[in-house]
Image (tube, rainbow, N blue to C red):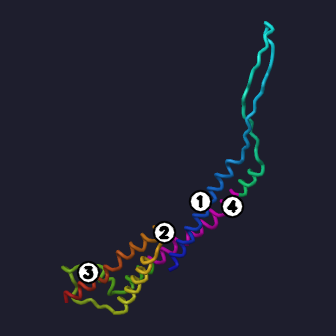
């Protein structure tokens, strides 16, 4: 299923983006070099007593190498975000829509499945005309979806989508069985 591959690529792109954010935080801490410095000043007061003053302060210098690394990382992150991540996000949504379109077409192109979808036992039509091939396609679709539930999948969005489709599709088979037992 293309949708599963697209979701996997999207998760990999997201993980790479998280690594880049982690690297950015690491390099960001190295951009400035802080040094503790102190100064001792000696002098004489009006009464000719010696006085000593101490002043502690910090100086900061820009680490040009780290700044260059940070700039390159921003460019890589920007490219990854705008090219790779956006592409995988788009193809993931598009693939999900293709699956939903297939399911919609499967039900709507079959007069039998379409009529079973709105079947209610109290208002049953006189005769539902259906073909065995419609039910076979529906069962194959459900079987493919069930095959994904048997796999270890870490993508919760993909799992939720599969479960949502699996909640909807078996209703058609149930309604068919209810209708056939009524006849």
Q: Residues within 10 Å of mark 4 (few under 14, many from 20)?
A: some
Residue for point 58% across, 70% down:
88
| Magenta region, residue range | 73-100
Residue 83 covered by magenta stretch: yes
Residue 76 numbered tag: 4
Residue 121 covered by magenta stretch: no
Q: What secondary structure is found at the residue carrying circle 4?
A: helix
The CA span between labels 1 and 3 is: 49 Å
Q: Quadrant of the C terminus?
A: bottom left
Residue 155 numbered tag: 2
The CA span between labels 1 and 2 is: 16 Å
Residue for point 61% across, 64% down:
16
Q: Quadrant of residue 80?
A: bottom right
Q: Residues within 10 Å of mark 2 (few under 14, many from 20)?
A: few
Image location of residue 68, percent across then percent down? 76, 53
Q: What secondary structure is found at the residue carrying circle 1?
A: helix
| Chain-order first, disc 1 or disc 2 | 1
The residue labelled by disc 1 is 18
Marks 1/2 in contact by CB < 8 Å: the verdict is: no
Q: Residues within 10 Å of mark 3 (few under 14, many from 20)?
A: some
Residue 119 numbered tag: 3
Image location of residue 175, percent across then percent down? 27, 82
Of the two numbered discs 1 and 4 in the rendering, the one whose residue sits closer to the viewer = 1
The CA span between labels 4 and 2 is: 26 Å
Residue 52 numbered tag: none
Q: What secondary structure is found at the residue carrying circle 2?
A: loop
Residue for point 73% across, 55% down:
69
Image location of residue 14, percent across then percent down? 57, 64
What is the residue that sits farthest to the top in this orientation? 47
Residue for point 67% across, 47% down:
29
32 displayed left or right of 109: right
8 displayed left or right of 84: left
């Amino acid at each position: 299923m293309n949708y599963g591959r697209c979701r996997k690529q999207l998760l990999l792109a997201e993980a790479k983006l998280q690594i880049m954010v982690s690297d950015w935080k690491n390099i960001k801490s190295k951009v400035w070099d802080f040094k503790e410095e102190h100064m001792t000043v000696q002098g004489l007061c009006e009464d000719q007593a010696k006085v000593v003053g101490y002043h502690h302060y910090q100086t900061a210098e820009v680490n040009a190498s780290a700044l260059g690394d940070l700039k390159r990382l921003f460019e890589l992150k920007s490219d990854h975000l705008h090219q790779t991540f956006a592409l995988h996000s788009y193809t993931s949504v598009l693939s999900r829509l293709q699956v939903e379109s297939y399911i919609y077409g499967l039900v709507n192109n079959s007069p039998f499945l379409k009529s079973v979808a709105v079947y209610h036992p109290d208002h049953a039509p006189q005769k539902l005309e259906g073909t065995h091939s419609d039910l076979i396609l529906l069962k194959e679709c459900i079987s493919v979806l069930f095959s994904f539930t048997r796999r270890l999948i870490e993508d919760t969005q993909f799992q939720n989508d599969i479960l949502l489709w699996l909640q909807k599709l078996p209703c058609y088979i149930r309604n068919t069985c209810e209708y056939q037992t009524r006849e």
